[in-house]
Amino acid sequence: MPSTNTAILTQNLTKFYGSFQALHGVDLSVQRGEIFGFLGPNGAGKTTTIRCLLDLIHRDGGEVVVLGVDPAADPVAVRRRVGYMPGELHLDESLTAEALFRYFNELRHGAADWAHVRQLAKRLDLEIQRPIRNLSHGNKQKVGIVQALMHKPELIIMDEPTQGLDPMMQQVVLGLLKELQASGSTVFFSSHIMNEVESIAHRVGIIRDGRIVEVADPKTLGKRSLNRVRIRFQQPVDGAELAKVSGVTLLSQDNGHLVHLQIEGEMDPLIKALAKMPVSDFETERPSLEEAFLAYYDEPEKK
């Protein structure tokens, strides 16, 4: 049994679509009160995993426990305590956003404070009196966000929540998730936008071909990727000599005065080598989480 501090637990989760196996023994553990980012390219298994968490599709094997409950045994009990936003929204477009929110609130036995609902809509710049069919794609996305967050759920599960939003509104949504986490909610969200995951997630899980290949702190993951260094020298040096340093690759050199290097691993060996050279300027480029993810994902699959 999972700890009472565990919001989501999957062990050896498997799912088939006919003869195609979408999930190959997915193991995840998300702690209460954390923001967990779920990364992977299209088709990797993110959405299938999320749907299994809520028993929107039935798993074929393994264990799933959400807030202490097996969703296959009591899906209504799980969904009542979860705020869920699917990656593909299907809304009744004949309703206004307000009517839709009131409908969801009735399903949740009036769990939402209506003043909070209006505040969410205001922060997202969403007009709730307009029929949904007259809303833009981005505003329909906001409707999905509000319905997921309106009742301040214990657990928030969102599948690509910021897709279709402009960069400023993406930051508003991420801010809302941080606020809800600070008030005690757990957040589990999938994304392909690496920098947004890096900005708010406490831990990141990477799924590849239906398998979890890594669970790590975003900062730890970022350190795995390659650093780039730009060095200007007072007089020409042979960049090929620097390329002999462990983990260093020469990218380019301009008459020996300006050298671009790529470093894998620790910087210490390069720093020691440069101590003997006439360095006038030294710049490093911090890798993004996206680079770290792509570097990892491009590796041959571990056996």
Image (cartoon, rainbow, N blue to C red):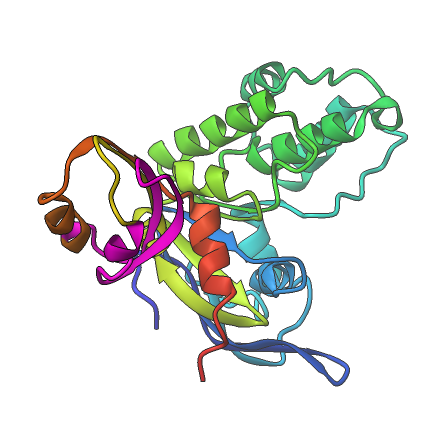
Residue at x 46% of width, y 27% of height: 175
Q: Position of residue 182 (x, y in %)?
A: 34, 33
Res 66 seen here: no
Q: Quadrant of the C terminus?
A: bottom left
Q: In which quarter of the image is the N terminus?
A: bottom left
Q: Where is residue 188 in the image (x, y as percent from the top left)?
A: 48, 49
**In the figure, 149 relative to 85: above or below?**
above
Q: Where is residue 266 in the image (x, y as percent from the top left)?
A: 21, 55
Q: In which quarter of the image is residue 4?
A: bottom left
> Does the magenta portion include 264?
yes
Residue at x 45% of width, y 62% of height: 296
Seen in the image, is 90 located left or right of residue 197?
right
Seen in the image, is 228 located left or right of residue 159?
left
Seen in the image, is 167 located left or right of residue 303?
right
The span shown in magenta is: 239-268
Q: Where is residue 45 in the image (x, y as percent from the top left)?
A: 61, 65
**In the figure, 148 relative to 98: above or below?**
below
Q: Quadrant of residue 119?
A: top right
Q: What is the number of callouts on the image? A: 0
> Does the magenta portion include 24?
no
- 302 or 82: nearer the viewer: 302
- 247 or 17: nearer the viewer: 247
Residue at x 67% of width, y 48% of height: 86
Seen in the image, is 125 located left or right of residue 64?
right
- 102 or 225: nearer the viewer: 225
Residue at x 50% of width, y 75% of height: 300
**In the figure, 5 relative to 169: above or below?**
below
